[in-house]
Image (cartoon, rainbow, N blue to C red):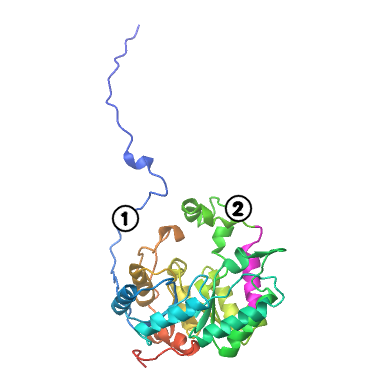
Amino acid sequence: MRKFLLLALPLVPVALGQTISIEEYEPKSTLRVPEHKLTRAKFPFIDVHNHQREVSPEKLDKLVADMDSLNMQILINSPVSGGSGKWVANMVTAMKGKDPNRFAVMTNIDYNNLEDPNYGTRVATQLEADIKAGAIGLKIWKHLGMMLNDSKGRVKVDDPRFDPVWEMCAKHKIPVLIHTGDPWGLFQPMDKNNERWLELKLRSGRNQSQQTNFTWEQLIEEQHALFARHPKTIFVNAHLGWLGHDLGRLGELLDRLPNVYAEVGAITSELGRQPRAARRFFVKYQDRILFGKDLYSVPEYYTYFRLFETDDDYFDPIRKYHGIWKLYGLDLPDDVLKKVYYKNALRIFPGLSSAGFPE
């Protein structure tokens, strides 16, 4: 009979790293390449998409200090919602009183009593009053198309009840900064093929595929139909119209509709993963793109500067859940940078001061 010697082997603990989740995974790159971590824009710029709901003298002092450090010459305050009437008058007084050359204000429209037969005339009249009070643009949030309802259901982006509003904007030549919908991936199933999976995991409220009865395509088609129906109104399509993943389609829209511009807020991750295609797009449509940040954060501007001004490889995005990839700089030519940073905004927004900008 054979005898076997049993050896007592030490217990080996499971490595801690094996227990982390994908949400916790944050690998540090070992790549060694040139880095240019910019904290100030090469040229003065205008932020056309910036949310400042309330301001005080102290907050305005801090804003001016921040703007000076970033080389932001003008901040255009574009409220998400509720900014009209008395709010506009007060905000214009506060911000323009601080420095009439550094600040400007947009207005919103009131969606109350939408089914009133005189709704369109009423809100257009209020819009005209806001323009006379100093508003230089109209901000439309994704509420229109996604959340706004009447007794018949969802109110579409191109609902004709708003036609007097767009016509009033055309009359006074003020642009409409319009945010429609959310990124395409947030409307798709949360499965292994969805590159926005991490965002849906961390921000479950953004899962449009489970909480809406309309599609991303419906929203975008309604928006484009609105642009086409009002060719005399200037529309600035916020967030590149959520077409940063399909620049060919965005280019076709700009080719077809000369009244449409695009704004770059919150889409650095889309542009930074396709630097060659994005650079070609910016060069071709350099007269149709405006700078905007959306949510105000001084350190996040640095990523925009690095994306637009350098040819850096493989650097971190602002938020990893916008896409689990790194960014690459576009290294835009100076003449393109100047148009994106300030020349296009000076051309289409009425009343902005050109003081402080190079030729």
Q: Position of residue 135 (x, y in %)?
A: 49, 83
| Residue ranking furthest to the bottom | 359
| Mark 1, other Cα within 10 Å: few <14 / some 14–19 / many ≥20 | few
Quadrant assignment, res 155: bottom right
Q: Position of residue 146 (x, y in %)?
A: 61, 64
Q: Is residue 224 found inside the magenta-colored segment of the image?
A: yes
Quadrant assignment, res 253: bottom right
Q: Can see residue 258?
A: no
**Which residue lies at the image location 53% right of the left edge and 57% below the top edge?**
206
Q: Which residue is mark 2?
A: 210
Please, is residue 17 above or below residue 152 in the view? above
Classified by dominant secondary structure, the portion drawn in magenta counts as helix
Depth check, front residue: 210 or 349: 349
| Mark 2, other Cα within 10 Å: few <14 / some 14–19 / many ≥20 | some
For the residues labelled 1 and 2, the Cα–Cα distance comes to 34 Å
Quadrant where the C terminus sits is bottom left
What secondary structure is marked by label 1?
Answer: loop
What secondary structure is marked by label 2?
Answer: helix
Q: Which residues are magenta?
A: 213-226
Q: Residue 28 — which label?
A: 1
Quadrant where the N terminus sits is top left
The amino acid marked with disc number 2 is: Gln
